[in-house]
Amino acid sequence: MRPFFMHRFEEPAAALLRVVAGLMFMQHGAQKLFGWLKAPDAPPGTVELMSQMGLAGVLEFFGGLLIVLGLFTRPVAFILSGLMAVAYFTAHAPQGPVPILNRGELAVLFCFIFLYFSARGGGRYSLDHLVARRGTAPRR
């Protein structure tokens, strides 16, 4: 059986998913930490850094940046997956069990995207891959 033609694009597609997910996630951290990218009717200001929301903002922004770069992908993605699970069960699930109704579908989706990258790693187009190649390459 011939493979579907898209199999050739597996690595670039995974890298694109990793980068886009990281950039989207960073925006949530930017809102919390810096007050950027807020809706016009949103209250001004940022969250207290030494709070649960502040910690979430740091993880979202800087963890998202590490995901974009593909650096420390597995452990960072694992932590971010856990962050999104906690966010879902503390902020969304109390409103009801169905994500589309409790507005938690984004938290669920991020949770599983990051869980996937914690298992897969950053892939060929990541700094993790570059670091691993440099560490195992013969020295001249």
Image (cartoon, helix red, strand yellow):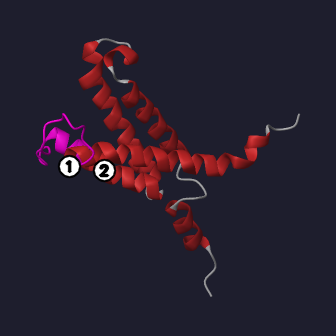
Check contact, mark 2 vs mark 1: CB within 8 A: yes
Residue 11: image x %, image y %?
64, 50
Q: Which residue type does callout 1 highlight?
A: Leu
Q: In which quarter of the image is residue 82?
A: top left
Earlier residue among tags 2 and 1: 1
> Mark 2 sits on what residue?
61
Residue found at the very far right of the displayed protein:
1
| Dot 2 crowding, Cα within 10 Å, few <14, some 14–19, many 20+ | many
Assign the C terminus to one quadrant of the image. bottom right
> Mark 1 sits on what residue?
33
Q: In which quarter of the image is residue 72?
A: bottom left
- In terms of secondary structure, what is the magenta stretch mainly? loop
Depth check, front residue: 9 or 115: 9
| Dot 1 crowding, Cα within 10 Å, few <14, some 14–19, many 20+ | many
Depth check, front residue: 77 or 7: 7
Give the residues in magenta: 34-57
In the figure, 11 relative to 3: above or below? below
